[in-house]
Amino acid sequence: MHKFLPYAWFKGKCVPFNEAKVSIATHALHYGTAAFGGMRAIPDPSSSGSMLLFRADRHASRLCQSAKLLLAELREESVLEALGLVLKANQPNCPIYLRPFVYTSDLGIAPRLHDIETDFLIYGLELGDYLSPDGVSCRISSWTRQEDRSLPLRGKISGAYITSSLAKTEAVKSGFDEALLLNTQGKVSEASGMNLFIVRDGRLITPGVDQDILEGITRASVIEIAKNIGISVIERPVDKTELFIADEVFLTGTAAKITPIRKLESTTLSQERPIMEALRSKLLNITEGRDPEYENWITRISL
């Protein structure tokens, strides 16, 4: 069972979570006309009474860009201010996941984005490891990742996640932990809610933004970290067969952090992952506020 934080941001203020309710006629519920973000907050290991947010500015910026795709207005400053107020209201003392959400709150029945009310909310829940840090098993999904010409994939549009939901359930029901989706060109795109990296001959390779991926914030962070520590990074199309012969294969995401793939279909992959482990260790130090070089990636909220 999820353990939700006691207070949520709803209708412009912090209210008890159980009082933050929407109508069954809410437009976004019926048409997927919403966009969401997700970010982790952890207690500051070096100071009691404060929480650390990882790349809060980037998360707020992406949510506002997603809102723009829905023809909704949302300001980054408003998102960041509300996040701070939610943390102060809840006084968390463990790692949590925050879900900011912009949605069409109108009660109309026409599928549209013009002349319609929108609103913004935030809730949170306690969250440890979303996926096992020891690694996950994956299958290639029978479902295909959508194209950007049919859905604005650079935004985290809620309606787009029907494909992720179908792929995830298909994977779990067939004995795997996670799904990998191919795009309409037959190239590897991403997992159900994570970006993908492989390592070949000491080089870090990941599908580019032209492969119908979500422009993941953890993905961008891993790329930047890798370049800064001297690892060659290549963004290009990835073939399915490359996954089976790669030296390392791993996933990245806000919830997943950095998670290795230990098995793909019926093939057990290498357990030697020196590049992934170096990146994971570095990212952990950054998110815990212990790396001065990346201090600007961390927002400290005093409770």
Image (cartoon, rainbow, N blue to C red):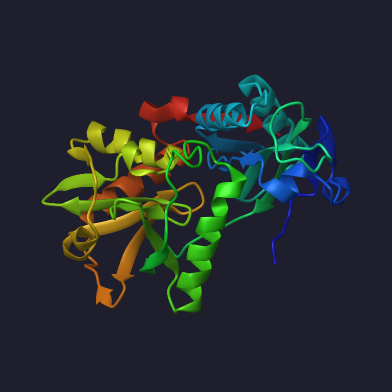
* Nearest the eye: 280 or 172: 172
Give residue 286's quadrant in the image.
top left
Whether residue 19 is visible, yes or no, is yes
For image coordinates 44% across by 42% down, the residue present is 214
Q: Which quarter of the picture shows residue 75?
A: top right
Q: Position of residue 127 (x, y in %)?
A: 60, 55
In the rendered image, residue 16, in percent from the top left (x then y), is placed at: 86, 45
Picture coordinates of residue 248, whole percent (x, y):
23, 58
User: What's the residue at 63%, 32% (across, down)?
Assistant: 70
Q: Residue at x 21, y 39 (%)?
A: 233
Evaluate whether residue 47 shows in this view. no
In the image shown, does 239 or 289 lie closer to the viewer? 239
Q: State the residue lying farthest toward the left.
A: 201
Q: Is residue 233 above or below residue 260?
A: above
Quadrant where the C terminus sits is: top right
Question: Which residue is found at the position 63% from the left and 51% from the top?
Answer: 94
**In the image, 272: left or right of 185?**
left
Q: Is residue 157 left or right of residue 90?
A: left
Which one is nearer the viewer's eye here, 201 or 189? 189
